[in-house]
Image (spheres, coloured by chain):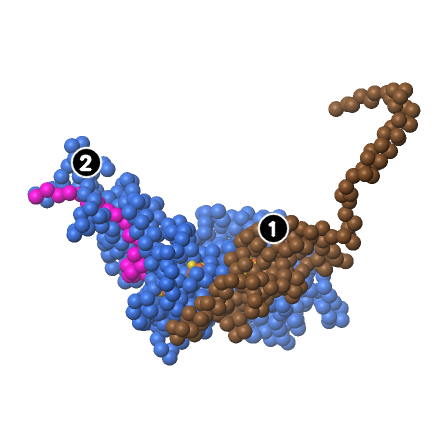
Chain colours: A blue, B brown
Amino acid sequence: MSAPPSKSNPAPDTLTVVVDGKPVTVPRTTPDPVSGRPLPTTMIQACEAAGVVVPHYCYHPKLPVAGNCRMCLVEFGLPALGPDRQPILNPDGTPKIVLQTLPYDPGVPRAAIACATPLSPGMEIYTNTPSVRKTREAVLESLLINHPLDCPICDQAGECKLQEYSVEYGQSESRFAETKVHKPKQVDLGPRIMLDDERCILCSRCIRFTRDIVGDDALGIVSRGSHSTLTAYPGRPFDNNYTLNTVDLCPVGALTSKDFRFQMRVWFLKETNNLCPSCGTGCNLVIGSRENRIYRYEPRQNDAVNSCWMCDFGRLNYKWIQRPDRLAEVGRRNADGGFDASSWTPALREVADKIKGLPAGALAIVASARQTNEELFLLQRLAQHRQALTDSIPRLGDADHLLVNADKNPNSTGSRLIGIAGPDLGTRLPTMATGIAEGRIKGLIVFGEDVVRHGLTEELLQRLELLVVSDVLPNATTALAHYLLPGCAHAEKRGSFVNVKRQLQRFNQAVAPPGNARPEWEFLVECVGRVLGEPLPATLEGLFNQMAKEVPAFQGQTWAGLGDLGKKLG
Amino acid sequence: MIVKRTALTWWERLYIPAVLNGFRVTLRHFFRRKVTMQYPEEKWVVPPGYRGAPYLVKDQDGRTKCVSCQLCEFICPPKAIRIVPPGPEVDPATANVEKRPREFEIDMLRCIFCGFCQEVCPEEAIFLMEDYSLTGGSRSEMVYDLPRLLALGGTHHDPIMKWQQKAREAGLQGVKP
Ligand code: SF4
Ligand code: SF4
Ligand code: SF4
Ligand code: SF4
Ligand code: FES
């Protein structure tokens, strides 16, 4: 180690410790994940800063510390102090470090739990000594004593910390010959959660999450010793809107999601970064899919948006993507009022030509605030060219104290910034309705909304000369369309949203759309490019970068620059 | 590479000596022990440990041993195995073995009889048996489904019966298994 920190002129609010021989400087305090109060920085945080992995079960950076699993035990040494409270120096001038040992048996190193032990200046942490390895082995052995070893029928297998640490730090053979303690299996905790008490390692992560993060003190441990059992408050289902986060938090397969239970092994799932489109918060998530079927959503950490969590509603709101009645074919109304299946090239050409044939100001566009920025941008370019009236439709619901926002559109902010909608969504719809009624507006383009339910009644729509509708599921508006263009769900295309806090975030394609459906931006590029008479970028990156040049709020952004976590707009 | 063709000698061009030489070889084998097997009337007895077609087995209580852990599906090099897990519905008939395959298919045209599935199976539910001659009239007929695999696999005597043992232990402790 170099000179003691007091001599190397440290900032007063940092301190330097040594992790496995590597000096690392960390803040003296770290905010408490729940209250935000400053707490002394702990050993495990210093190890993380040094890039050293300390195995742990109960510690979670976003939860209060419990320190009950003992998996994170490490050895440490402290600078020796003389009677004058000054560090004793080695002959070469470095401070003398004393390995901490048991007070009653100085021959045995004293281990400390890294997750709950505060740092002190000059401390040296050793995470990989023979005795630390022995300790981990012993902790794992004790955790496995009553463990059912259900791996072949356990949903956690493949992402189980007990499996992983057993392989990495455990023993290969069990010495346990006695009968295991059995606990309840298939415990129905609530509408979305199934608990297997035998697999629980009593880390209390789930308890702390629901008590301290959600504010619903619903879970607890009853009985003692090896009979300790996790349970919900008697007579009350565990049913707040965040219960499924405990399934992610649970390091083992004790808490399982009823929705995902026994559906697919996790190692088959392809993981795609995406966003939750169920409200304006825009929680970051990972879609797990296999062979074009979506199996689950899991939250993805983004401290600017959703921390490590997401709500149960958003997590389970994916089934519609695979509904059998998804729109999958291009439709074109024929002379006698029926629908003909068409193909993209002629349909887009006809739509573009008909739009060009309308007089300026005779077109209106309703573009959902569920469409991506790129799609809204293309529609806005079209609107400017044809002097069209545009709007989006507001979608309001309940908000809560944690994540859920009252704005149920994922991209209301994007729609405002691009200029499709005014400050209040939906205020131009009455003007549109009068325009159609008076015959001034002859053409209407609808993207992703059932406008019949929002004041543009069926009679009004029937007066139009041109009604182009793009959607993913059939509704009253798609039934009246002259041209029906099947679009994609957010999981089937790439694009970007701006959330209610102006975080510009992008998402990737997880599965292929059904039938002939295509991402809206793709066919809009062709169609709008034809109306405008100028070639538009044929890649999403190019389109985004062009949008960033033209829309003032997105100045300076690039697709590549957004990264996985997005960028906050000024 | 160019191989130069040498011209036949006068002796070789006679042909008669070559023909007679052939007869000599045939005549010699006529008096030796016969090695030809009259397949398919006569069938080959496979040696122990032979890796034939993989089938699923039941235990002596008639329970399908496979718990649809999908490890064999994962390990199978030519991706011959397809399994559909049961989903969340609880089947009271399978007691404490919460999982069983809803569908299990092996495409015998794809299978290369490597034996990885048998080796990886944590439940001793799949075995490479002695069948080596699989025939079918179409490709789809060569995809063996769950009932067929179980019928062909038969019973495997399990000396441990771990799930039953677990249920018994839990029962003795007063816990519903
Ligand atoms: S919790 Fe982990 S170790 Fe336990 S049965 Fe499940 S996968 Fe296996
Ligand atoms: S159920 Fe999971 S998260 Fe909860 S205490 Fe048990 S092991 Fe920990
Ligand atoms: S024997 Fe090999 S190829 Fe055949 S099913 Fe088993 S793992 Fe697949
Ligand atoms: S490895 Fe064995 S238990 Fe698992 S799915 Fe295959 S046959 Fe069934
Ligand atoms: S992580 Fe559980 S005691 Fe430290």
Residue extent of the magenta highlight? A60-83
Judged from this view, the residue extending furthest toward the bottom is A235
Q: Chain of mark 2?
A: A
The quadrant of the image that shows the C terminus of chain A is: bottom left
Circle 2 Cα neighbour tier, 10 Å, few/some/many (<14 / 14–19 / ≥20): some
Give amino acid for label 2: Thr
Q: Residue A390, percent across and down?
A: 55, 64
Q: Position of residue A365 (x, y in %)?
A: 58, 64
Which amino acid type corresponds to the residue marked 1 in the rendered image? Gly
Checking the image for residue A94, the label placed there is 2
Residue A64 part of the magenta-drawn span: yes
Relative horizontal placement of residue A205, taking residue A468 as reference (left or right): left
- Quadrant hosting ligand 1: bottom left
Secondary structure under the numbered disc 1 in the rendered image: loop
The circle on residue B49 is 1
Farthest front residue?
B31
Instruction: Give percent across and percent down for residue B136.
Output: 74, 57
